[in-house]
Amino acid sequence: MLSASDFRNGATFEWDGDVYQVLEFQHVKPGKGAAFVRATIRSVLSGATKELTFNPTEKFNDAQLETKEMQYLYNDDALYYFMDNETYEQLPLNKDEVSEAIQFLRENDTAVIRFYKGKAFSVQAPNFVELEVTQTEPGVKGNTTTGATKPATVETGFTLNVPLFVNIGDRIKIDTRSGEYLSRV
């Protein structure tokens, strides 16, 4: 059991038929009246975010979440297939469950999949990936404004802004959390 006064960033709990993760919390003791906990929570199943207040003595059941590293195999337009590296069991996931991470994953790349009661609800790409640029405009000589960028598409189909010196065929490092260019590899 977890009480509202025990909330910490990242804590997960079951409440109101859903599983929530604490994003931010604050213990408030007003000069007049009872203390309370103000928290921003996110549903781990749907991704919806709420800001609520709780009585510090409210109790919640702990949510047991599993995390597994799995290998991305392929997709067949409707489903994306991942393989458990220990049991070689394949897990098909639909586009909604992989939408954020799939734009950074190539076939045979490893991803972290989170489960609640045996059901996958989230796919996370590694924090940094190295991908090849497949399409971009050539940089124009003399266009050397500091910090100038141009759009580029990488091998997974993701489009981002890169510096003018990046060309087709270059391998670049991308931060998957923000989708930003980090460096040329």
Image (cartoon, rainbow, N blue to C red):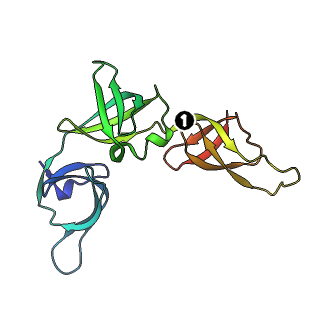
Position of 140 with respect to 109 (left or right) is: right
User: Residue furthest toward the front?
Assistant: 77
- Residue at the farthest bottom position: 32
Residue placed most toward the observer, 37 or 132: 132
Quarter of the image that includes the C terminus: top right
173 vs 145, left or right, is left
Residue lying at 83% horizontally and 54% vertically, measured from the top left = 144
Quadrant in which residue 81 is drawn = top left
Give coordinates of residue 155: x percent, y percent: 58, 36
Near-viewer residue (60 or 142): 142
Which corner quadrant of the image does residue 85 belong to? top left
Q: Is residue 58 above or below residue 177?
A: below
Q: Is residue 26 visible?
A: no
Q: Along the horizontal axis of the image, is 105 left or right of 24?
A: right
Residue at the limit of the structure toward the right, as seen here: 142
Residue 142 image position (x, y, % from top left): 88, 53
Q: Residue at x 84, y 55 (%)?
A: 143
| Residue 85 visible somewhere in the drawing | yes
Q: Where is 125 relative to 6, above or below?
A: above
SS at badge 1: strand
Q: Residue at x 24, y 76 (%)?
A: 30
Against 63, residue 72 (above or below) is: above
Picture coordinates of residue 41 (x, y %)?
28, 59
- Looking at the image, how many numbered discs can be counted on the residues? 1
Task: Identify the residue at image location x=61%, y=38%.
Answer: 173
From what the image shows, is residue 9 above or below residue 71? Answer: below
**What's under tag 1, amino acid-wise?**
Val
Q: Nearer the viewer, residue 36 or 52?
A: 52
Quick one: label 1, few (<14), some, or many (20+) residues within 10 Å? some
Which residue has dot 1 on it? 129
Please provide percent x and percent y for residue 70. Answer: 36, 28
